[in-house]
Image (cartoon, grey):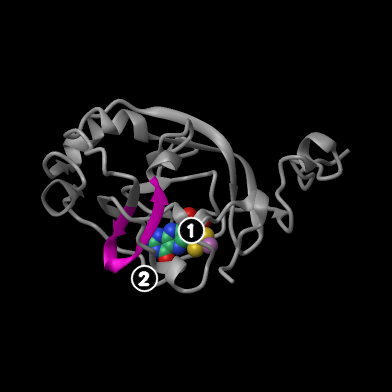
């Protein structure tokens, strides 16, 4: 049998169907979605940094080299976009968020929420506890390769428990907050909790 076009996942198989949240279809492509244009970078060591501030003992800053020196991890998991595509077994590498926390000044007890700040003013918010889960990380490789520019090079947040808009591309800052603050899509009418399994797509 000629298998070139055979799908990797058979949606009728229960073990596959159980992994697809309500209202989603499977894709083996990797669609690109964002507002605005794709930033281009030269000389990351001198033009890029990652800043951390808010409910933390003191603000922190990582140069590109400093960030890349942090211990990395690999995660293989499923992602779900609110535009209804899901992609199974995606492989990401980066710094697990709980690992990242070991390398910044202590969080204040008041730190309960995170606002990711990206190039061009894009933001996305998540509760801190979501970033403490196993798969949540700051990702810079997909499928063993450096992220492509359209998928967020050189760094994005990776929050697979939520619809994929919370996985913020072109990440430049992490702000710890005592009160939740809505991000870009959340202010546009998308559901703040964004749980794909509860189909929390839009706010009411
Ligand atoms: N900086 C930034 N990150 C973003 C967005 C954006 O507009 N700007 N869009 C989000 C949305 S809606 C989705 S579905 C995912 C898409 O990620 P992908 O293009 O890698 O598939 O990125 C998210 N991260
Ligand atoms: Mo999205």
- Label 1 CB less than 8 angstroms from ligand 1: yes
Image point (29%, 51%), residue name: 178
Check whether the beta carbons of the residues at disc 1 and disc 2 lie within 8 A of each other. Answer: no
Report the disc number at residue 165: 1
What element does badge 1 sit on? helix
| Residue 179 point in image, percent of width and height | 32, 55
Looking at the image, tell me whether mark 1 or mark 2 is earlier in sequence order.
2
- List the residue tagged with mark 2: 37
Q: Nearer the viewer, residue 23 or 199?
A: 199
Q: Nearer the viewer, mark 1 or mark 2?
A: 1
Most frequent secondary structure within the magenta stretch? strand
Q: Which residues are magenta?
A: 115-127
Question: Is 145 positioned to the left or the right of 175 in the image?
Answer: right
Q: Is residue 40 above or below residue 10?
A: below
Q: CA distance from mark 1 to mark 2?
A: 16 Å
Q: Which image quadrant for residue 166?
A: bottom left
């Amino acid at each position: 049998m000629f298998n070139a076009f055979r799908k990797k996942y058979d949606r009728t198989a229960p073990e596959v169907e159980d992994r697809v949240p309500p209202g989603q279809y499977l894709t083996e492509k990797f669609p690109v979605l964002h507002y605005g244009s794709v930033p281009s970078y030269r000389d990351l060591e001198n033009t890029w940094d990652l800043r951390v501030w808010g409910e933390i003992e003191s603000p922190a800053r990582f140069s590109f080299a400093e960030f890349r020196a942090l211990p990395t991890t690999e995660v293989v998991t499923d992602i779900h976009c609110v535009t209804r595509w899901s992609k199974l077994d995606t492989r990401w590498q980066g710094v697990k968020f709980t690992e990242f926390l070991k390398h910044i000044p202590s969080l204040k007890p008041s730190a309960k929420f995170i606002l990711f700040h990206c190039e061009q003013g894009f933001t996305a918010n998540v509760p801190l506890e979501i970033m403490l889960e196993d798969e949540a990380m700051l990702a810079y490789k997909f499928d063993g390769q450096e992220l492509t520019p359209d998928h967020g090079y050189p760094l994005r947040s990776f929050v697979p428990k939520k619809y994929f808009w919370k996985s913020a591309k072109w990440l430049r800052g992490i702000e710890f907050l005592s009160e939740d603050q809505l991000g870009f899509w959340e202010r546009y009418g998308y559901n703040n909790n964004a749980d794909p399994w509860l189909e929390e797509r839009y706010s009411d």
